[in-house]
Amino acid sequence: MQTRTEYDLLGEQQVPAEAWYGIQTQRAKQNFNITGVPISHFPELIRALAMVKAAAARANHQLGLLPGHKAEAIEAACADIIRGELHDQFIVDLIQGGAGTSTNMNANEVIANLALSKLGHERGRYKELHPNNDVNRSQSTNDAYPTAARLAIVFAAQPLKEAIAGLQHSLADKGREFAHILKMGRTQLQDAVPMTLGQEFEAFAVNLGEEEARIDDACRLLCEVNLGGTAIGTGINAHPRYARLAVNELADIAELPVSLAGNLVEATSDMGAFVTFSSVLKRLAVKLSKLSNDLRLLSSGPRTGLGEISLPAMQPGSSIMPGKVNPVIPEAMNQTAFQVMGADLAVTLAAEAGQLQLNAMEPLIIYNLLNSCRMLGEAIRMLDERCVRGIEANEAQCASHVANSIGIVTALVPHIGYDNASRIAGQALLSGAGVAELVQKEGLLSEAQLAAILSPAAMVAPVEA
């Protein structure tokens, strides 16, 4: 393999001649082989890094700190990367020491070499355009990296929101489809009072629909950035007007309501917005796991469980039990949710581990948030397309559960009193007789009165006495 020689603080290093990255990226590749997941795994992060570098180049040029030909070349290189080019050159592991320096330098080097090629120079000719002096001008890893990370998470949240909306729509459709089907509601896994299967699915939809607004709230927090604060928020090595110029340009490039933090020292060390976003993902995961649990319970059986709904069969369920079909899609959703809940703890611990003016654990935070966004989005689409849309109601089983349940006695309490209702329930439990049969036998209510009280309309919504 042909190589080129590059130099840094530690000496020289051979870099593949065809690589668009440089020596610091090469060292990071050698040092950090932890997850096997390079930063290119999340194109949102690569695009966001290029946006930050393009905004910085524009601001530096406006301030007279970067010659026009260099600014134009850098911006053109960034535009290529934003469109998806050379993402395979972003090779450093997402988990790394140095608070993201390796990620920042990977971006600086790729952009510098791509800009050099646009100026007619060979890769590595940094005397003509330098990764640090030009691409990273007026920046530090400590403001460029977290700013890009915040944008990347906001980008990643959009397909997640779309997935949530799709699943919510499918659940609402099932709510309308099942609106006429009477079934037993349950509390603590015991018979409670009747409801419709449609009410159950409508509640699922409403519960999930709340999460889009929570994601939007968290994204607004992430749009406040510390770009221009450089190393620790004091703005050393940056022009006094650079921060606002760069943030305005970034808002234009990213098409997001990006704003400059009020106190850059505080913003450089604060991980609060990341923690908030992580907690929103955890909240969503908890709800999705509960939904999956309910789908598994409602479809349990098919002959010895609740069996009130049937999930679409996706694959044979056993290597030894013929005919068995498992609820594999909700099970996969459960596992995804557990992973996201665990990731939230990792984010929490990493955020707490910050010291003084910087949090060196940001790479772990970014890895977990981007990974959780992607996993949740894919799992939600799976649950929607391969499970919820194909759910069928077992209407006869639902009706049988209602007919055989002692729980309907609750509807009789206002008419025969709690003591009579308790006695009737006990007799029904011991004898196996129906509640309505025993009430009529004792002459507590007439057949017509029972029919009115125990009608579906009367049992699933409030009615006037």
Image: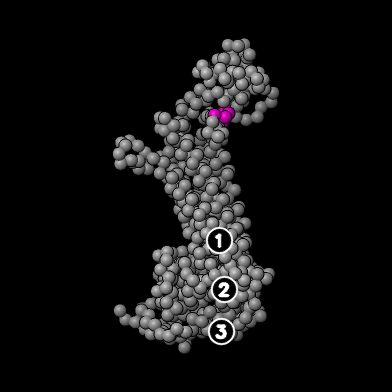
> Which type of secondary structure does the marked residue at label 3 adopt?
loop
> In this orientation, which residue lies closer to the viewer: 253 or 450?
450
The residue under label 1 is: 349
Residue 142, disc: 2
Residue 66, disc: 3
Residue at 53 percent of width and 63 percent of height: 365
Residue at 65 percent of width and 20 percent of height: 419
The image shows residue 153 at horizontal and vertical percentages of 54, 62
* Amino acid type, residue under disc 2 in the picture: Asn
Residue at 44 percent of width and 35 percent of height: 300
Check the image and report above or below for 199 versus 213: above
Q: Residues within 10 Å of mark 3 (few under 14, many from 20)?
A: many
Label 1 vs 2, first from the N-terminus = 2
Check the image and report above or below for 67 versus 101: below
Residue at 54 percent of width and 18 percent of height: 428
The image shows residue 139 at horizontal and vertical percentages of 57, 78
Q: Is residue 37 left or right of residue 149?
A: left
The image shows residue 71 at horizontal and vertical percentages of 53, 81
> Which type of secondary structure does the marked residue at label 1 adopt?
helix
Q: Residues within 10 Å of mark 1 (few under 14, many from 20)?
A: some
The image shows residue 431 at horizontal and vertical percentages of 51, 16
Check the image and report above or below for 5 versus 164: below
Quarter of the image with the C terminus in it: top right
* Amino acid type, residue under disc 1 in the picture: Leu
Question: Nearer the observer, disc 1 or disc 2?
Answer: 1
* Residues rendered magenta in the picture: 191-195
The reply to whether residue 153 is in sight is no
C-alpha distance separating marks 3 and 2: 21 Å
C-alpha distance separating marks 1 and 2: 19 Å
Q: Main secondary structure of the magenta part?
A: strand
